[in-house]
Image: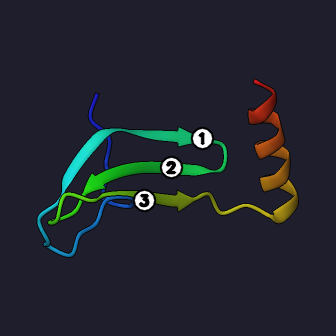
Amino acid sequence: MTRDTSPVMPTSGAPVQQVGVIEEHGYGRFAWILDGEGNRVELWEPVQLSAEEFERRLRAEKVQ
């Protein structure tokens, strides 16, 4: 299954390599890349939620 990674993956045109798969959680999406120097970089696209809903989802995920 292919997902649209454009919101979370860089689009600057700089050469990067995606590491692993994009993970989706109740508080956002995560992706990892290797930059041009081989450094692993974590990218996070937060979900647009109220502070209360964000905390509720974060607590619920920690329980699982």
What is the CA distance from the residue labelled 3 to the residue labelled 2?
A: 8 Å
List the residue tagged with mark 3.
Answer: 43
What is the CA distance from the residue labelled 3 to the residue labelled 1?
A: 13 Å
- Say left or right for 13 vs 24: left
User: Element at badge 2?
Assistant: strand
Question: Residue at the location (19% across, 57% down)?
Answer: 38
| Image mark for residue 38 | none
Q: Looking at the figure, which quarter contains the C terminus?
A: top right
Question: Residue at the location (76% across, 45% down)?
Answer: 58
* Badge 3 or badge 1: first in the primary sequence: 1
At label 3, the amino acid type is Leu
Q: Are marks 3 and 2 in contact (CB under 8 Å)?
A: no
Question: Residue at the location (39% across, 49% down)?
Answer: 31
| Image mark for residue 25 | 1
Q: Mark 3 packing: few (<14 Cα in 10 Å), some, or many (20+)?
A: some
User: Element at badge 1?
Assistant: strand
Q: Do the residues labelled 2 and 1 touch (CB within 8 Å)?
A: yes
Residue 9 horizontal/vertical position (percent): 31, 59
Q: Looking at the figure, which quarter contains the N terminus?
A: top left
At label 2, the amino acid type is Arg
Q: Mark 2 packing: few (<14 Cα in 10 Å), some, or many (20+)?
A: some
Coloring basis for residues: rainbow
Residue 27 horizontal/vertical position (percent): 66, 50
| Image mark for residue 29 | 2
What is the CA distance from the residue labelled 2 to the residue labelled 1?
A: 6 Å
Q: In which quarter of the image is residue 11?
A: bottom left
Question: Residue at the location (17% across, 60% down)?
Answer: 16
Residue 59 horizontal/vertical position (percent): 83, 41
